[in-house]
Amino acid sequence: MNERNERIFGVACTFRRASDVYRAAERVRDAGWTRWDVHTPYPVHGLDQAMGLPRSPVPRLTLLGGVTGFITGCLLTWYMNSYDYPLIVGGKPFWSVIFPFPVLYECTILFAAFGTFFGQFIFNRLPRHHHPLFDLPQFARVSDDTFMVVLEARDPQFRLDDARGFLQSLGGQEITVIRD
Amino acid sequence: MAHAPDSSSDRPAVLDRVRPAELPRAPLVLNDRGFHWITDKVCGIVEEPTPRWWKVTFLVALFVASFTGVGLAYLVSTGTGTWGLRAPVGWGWAIVNFVFWVGIGHAGTLISAILCLLRQKWRTSINRAAEAMTIFAVMCAGIFPLFHVGRVWFAWWLFPLPNQNAIWPQFRSPLEWDVFAVSTYFTVSTLFWYMGMIPDLGAIRDRARTWWRKAFYSLLAMGWRGGNRQWSNFEMAYLLLAGLSTPLVLSVHTIVSFDFAVSNVPGWHTTIFPPYFVAGAIFSGFAMVLTLMLPLRAIYRLHDVINQYHIDNMCKIILATGTMVGYAYATEFFIAAYSGNPYEKFAFINRAFGQYWWAYWIMVSCNVITPQLFWFRKVRENHSLVWIICLFVNVGMWFERFVITITSLANDYLPSSWGYYSPTIVDIFTFFGTFGFFSVLFLLFVRFLPLLPMAEVKMVTPQADPHAH
């Protein structure tokens, strides 16, 4: 039994309607599962709360990117127009925050966007081209019109038969074991 | 949600007799189409055998694009003099075309970012194509300043990179600000476009039958699995990119207008330029979105997802921004008269009645008068007419940039240095070719990438709401 368990990624169960999967998610959350996910063709409104997910950490990297961008812009313009090759323009100060402000502004946005974009990939653990879910024939329909709850074997309370029974009680349609 | 209390004692007695009318909301997807229909429709465009119209249009577009190639090759091998640039007009069509194409791009970002922040759900059907338009328009725009520098092989001096002269860019120049603004705009728009496309690329991957198709879309989809833990980060990142693109798009055309406004040429040195340029950019961009989407809607029978409500909204935005642009033209005249500055006064009288009067009146009739037809529902429902009006707007906005750039340079302070600028055949070929270049890119996008954001369109259907039943 233990040997078989190691080769199992989890158990999947499909749903046809957003309202069904929403209620199912609430029950999985209340049953105390931690390693599980709900796969949907589009972001279902309110599903984060139904799953009890914390707020996404992406904004931290956006802020980090923005601050880095502003400082980079300041250093860039200061080094080039004031330190390495001071430019005398109309007796103005060599560097101030005013004249290169458009450059600082654009650098801030550029780096914040990089932080957001790569943050999404980092926190989603992407790219990852191989995943046990891709071997499941039903999974191909998730990006179309099917919803799927997946309970993973990594969860401490995972027992294959219990998980299967639990998914059955949620009213799912097809219940499949995902091999790792 | 503020619900009326259920116990009958708290309930106003009138509610037992009457049913409160529900606010009618225009459906965004007509005929009650389901999720599978949307997937089939959008993936079908990519999966069907290449249609004949596509092949023909693509070849024509390639031919037109070759005009830019030939024009630029001739320019580089001969010199920028072939562009008809000479004193006093040193900016000519190059800058006119640059501002025109950058402006076109702005509607894409407006639709994808600003309407996203304002929770305008109708944006979902058109945002992908509009973002693609943005990126390709900025590419077309980039060609002109790049070759306008004269020795294009030194164009990298614009970037803060060490060069053999040991000098750096001068950050007090609006032209240098422009380098940062436009390159940031291009990069962020591309990131936003690509990130939004990942779930849809995943959907095409999941339906792929042939191995090369599977490999191509798998690579692009980055292994997207559509788990809600992924969606949660994705949605947050999408919202943040929308929030970053909004100040970005406003800053880009502001900085483009600084190219003019920071100089002290009469007719350019005005504080109205940034808002006026941004309104004009959105105006021309929406016209371009409609110019592109109306034929695509007819070819791919997308009437259920891009319906009259979407077209109405876009027409109304064109009407609003066109009226703003008209107001800006009037304000410019008033301020010129009120300023008491004879050069400024002359610049505006010269625009309307001087040697380029025809350009000015083409601009006014296309930008101020034609969009007023959109007040009438009959006009908005006649799609061929909408398409033609949008072409007029595109023409008018090109002429706006022509009027601003050329009239102010051709007749500035000293009458002895006045001149008359006309483009050469090389100018005309190069600009004409950019429409082909744009079309080549847009046709490739239509053929190989998801034209509509499937996930987002599914999200606005009634059955997407988990509390619907």
Image (cartoon, rainbow, N blue to C red):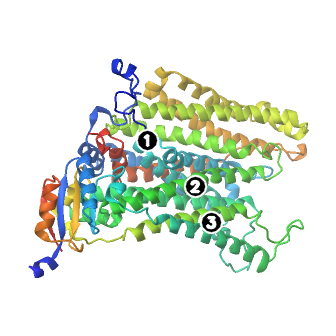
Chain ID, mark 3: A
Query: Residue B111 placed where, x, y %?
Result: 50, 45
The residue tagged 1 is B121
Q: Is residue A40 left or right of residue B390?
A: left
From what the image shows, is residue A13 above or below residue B297? below
Q: Which mark is residue A107?
A: 3
**Chain for disc number 1:** B
Q: Nearer the viewer, mark 3 or mark 1?
A: 1
Q: Which residue appears farthest toward the top when viewing the image? A: B17
Marks 3/1: CA–CA distance: 30 Å
Q: Position of residue B193 (x, y in %)?
A: 45, 56
Within-10-Å neighbours for mark 1: few <14, some 14–19, many 20+: some
Determine whether the residue tagged by mark 1 lies in a helix, strand or loop.
Answer: helix
Label 2 sits on a secondary structure element that is: helix
**Earlier sequence position, callout 2 versus callout 1:** 2
Q: Secondary structure at mark 3?
A: helix
Spatial separation of the CA atoms under disc 2 and disc 1: 43 Å
Location of residue B469 in the rendering, given as x and y in whole percent from the top left corner: 26, 39
Say which amino acid is labelled 2.
Gly
